[in-house]
Amino acid sequence: MHELGIVFYIIRDVKEVAGQNDVEHVSAVVMDIGEVSTVVPEYLTDCWRWAADKEDLLRGCELRCNIIPAVTHCGGCGKEYPTVEHGKTCPHCGSGETWLLRGNEVEIKEIEVT
């Protein structure tokens, strides 16, 4: 489960930003998680609860995850389509000349303070 490692990186980054801004307590962290990022949001939040409560800055802090739909672009016809539903082959023209536009991100979107 790589979600625990990701949680440690999130905590590191949140602590750094909090320190730069004289924040004493963080009430929520909002993440953007891509649909095909391989991160399981439920595992991430379980790991978060365990790890965050060990830090005074984050004790009781909520982790919220926004799921970003995966979208692929077709170089053959120039259209975009849902990646999970259609994979690497464009449903519009059948081309395999495609690339992922979004849906693979794992990013801190917001840090909420009290």
Image (spheres, rainbow, N blue to C red):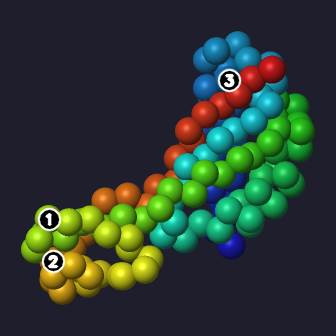
Q: Which residue sits at x=20%, y=66%?
A: 79
Q: Which residue sits at x=61%, y=17%?
A: 20
Circle 3 sits on which residue?
18
Q: In this view, does 24 lie above or below 78?
A: above
Where residue 60 sits, quadrant-wise, is top right
User: In this image, 50 relative to 93: left or right?
Assistant: right
Question: Disc 2 versus disc 1: distance between alpha carbons?
Answer: 10 Å
Mark 2 residue type: Glu
Could you say where residue 104 lies in the image, as x and y percent from the top left? 44, 62
Q: Is residue 6 above or below residue 83?
A: above
Circle 2 sits on which residue?
97
- Quick check: marks 1 and 3 in contact, CB under 8 Å? no
Q: In this view, does 56 lie above or below 34?
A: above
Labels 3 and 2: the sequence-earlier one: 3
Mark 2 Cα-neighbour bin, 10 Å: few <14, some 14–19, many ≥20: few
Mark 1 residue type: Gly
Mark 2 or 1, which is nearer the eye? 1
Circle 1 sits on which residue?
78
Could you say where residue 67 lies in the image, as x and y percent from the top left? 57, 57
Where residue 93 sits, quadrant-wise, is bottom left
Q: Which residue sits at x=86%, y=54%?
A: 50
Question: Disc 3 versus disc 2: distance between alpha carbons?
Answer: 43 Å
Assign a secondary structure to mark 2.
loop
Viewer-nearest residue: 51 or 92: 92
Could you say where residue 72 lies in the image, as x and y percent from the top left? 30, 67
Q: Which residue sits at x=80%, y=42%?
A: 62
Labels 1 and 3: the sequence-earlier one: 3
Labels 2 and 1: the sequence-earlier one: 1
